[in-house]
Image (cartoon, rainbow, N blue to C red):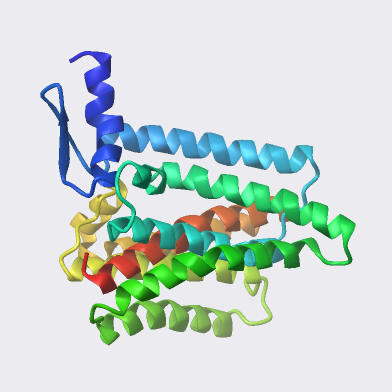
């Protein structure tokens, strides 16, 4: 196998198959399957690490104060990513335009939109008497309007399971509230920790319930946990990850590093969870 065939089978082909909403695609006799494999998992992991590190260095270089509050006002952009990923699953957007909505390309796409919105928010806040966070939040909400309308229109034509909807929403909410009540007024009672816990629990719960409905885990790590612990494997992994991160953050006095960590985990947990949740409700 030459390099071109290797790249097609393990890197490019899975993206094309995913964007085309088919299980596999063939080029020059080489078949590539949708989903993750060892090679693209490692490559996407390296790229993600490089992007995260680069963003962290940029915040330091340009003295951008990343806070938990800024993460909260950035939530619409995170929700946007999950919604657009779901919209691609519905085949509303056809190939080749759907490629931009496929992982990992969609992360770069949303990041680009977010950075432009961030720059615009900073300029407007300097020109007018309005806070940067307020402008950023309004921009995010504005971008959500069309995707939300598209999703609503799609769900109006199908029936959804109220039990699945309540299960995915209530489990993370109840556990997060219990955590808040248990650690109230202690060093563990911080908004940043609540964001970590809720986002990871939401993503884990959506994946756990999806497995019980016959959906297969595509990521290699989640596949491993599911094969060992059953449907609850992903949720257990998310709980463990949350505990480890919070434990590590207890020893840091770098508020910006903490906020950056919260931002990354919220993107992964909430963004992915929304896509899985909506797919399950839609039965696709």
The residue lying furthest to the top in this view is 2
Q: Tell me: residue 58, above or below residue 204.
A: above
Q: Foreground: 149 or 37?
A: 149
At x 49% / y 71%, what residue is drawn?
198
Residue sitting farthest toward the left: 29
Q: Which quadrant would residue 151 be assigned to in this image?
A: bottom left
Residue 274 appears at what percent x and percent y? 40, 66
Image x and y of residue 121, in percent: 75, 56
Residue at coordinates 43% horizontally, 76% vertically from top-left? 172
What quarter of the picture does the C terminus occupy? bottom left
167 over 118 or under it: above or below: below
On the image, the x and y values in percent for residue 167 come to: 32, 81
- Say which of 214 and 200 sits in front: 214
Q: Height in image: 77 above or below 6? A: below
Q: In which quarter of the image is residue 152?
A: bottom left
Q: How many numbered badges does the structure rendering display?
A: 0
**Residue 225, image x, y percentages:** 27, 55
**In-front residue for pair 193/132:** 132
Residue at 22% x, 43% y is 34
**In percent of the image, x 27 and y 38: which residue is there?**
16
Q: In which quarter of the image is the N terminus?
A: top left
217 or 2: nearer the viewer: 2
Q: Can residue 240 be seen in this view?
A: no
For residue 33, say whether it is visible.
yes
């Amino acid at each position: 196998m030459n390099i071109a065939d290797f790249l097609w089978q393990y890197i490019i082909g899975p993206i094309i198959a995913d964007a085309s909403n088919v299980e596999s695609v063939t080029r020059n006799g080489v078949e590539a399957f949708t989903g993750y494999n060892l090679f693209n998992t490692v490559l996407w992991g390296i790229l993600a690490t490089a992007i995260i590190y680069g963003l962290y260095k940029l915040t330091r270089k340009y003295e951008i104060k990343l806070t938990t509050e800024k993460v909260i006002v950035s939530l619409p952009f995170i929700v946007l990513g999950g919604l657009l990923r779901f919209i691609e699953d519905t085949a509303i957007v056809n190939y080749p335009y759907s490629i931009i909505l496929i992982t990992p390309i969609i992360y770069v796409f949303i990041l680009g939109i977010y950075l432009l919105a961030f720059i615009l928010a900073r300029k407007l806040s300097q020109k007018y008497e309005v806070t940067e966070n307020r402008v950023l939040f309004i921009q995010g909400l504005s971008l959500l309007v069309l995707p939300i309308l598209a999703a609503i229109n799609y769900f109006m034509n199908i029936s959804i399971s109220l039990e699945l909807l309540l299960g995915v929403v209530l489990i993370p909410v109840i556990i997060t509230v219990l955590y808040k009540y248990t650690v109230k007024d202690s060093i563990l009672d911080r908004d940043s920790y609540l964001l970590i816990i809720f986002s990871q629990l939401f993503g884990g719960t959506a994946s756990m319930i999806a497995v019980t409905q016959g959906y297969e885990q595509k990521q290699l790590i989640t596949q491993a946990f599911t094969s060992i612990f059953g449907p609850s494997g992903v949720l257990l992994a998310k709980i463990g990850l949350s505990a480890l991160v919070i434990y590590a953050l207890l020893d840091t006095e770098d508020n910006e590093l903490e906020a950056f960590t919260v931002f990354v985990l919220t993107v992964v947990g909430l963004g992915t969870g929304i896509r899985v949740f909506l797919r399950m409700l839609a039965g696709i």
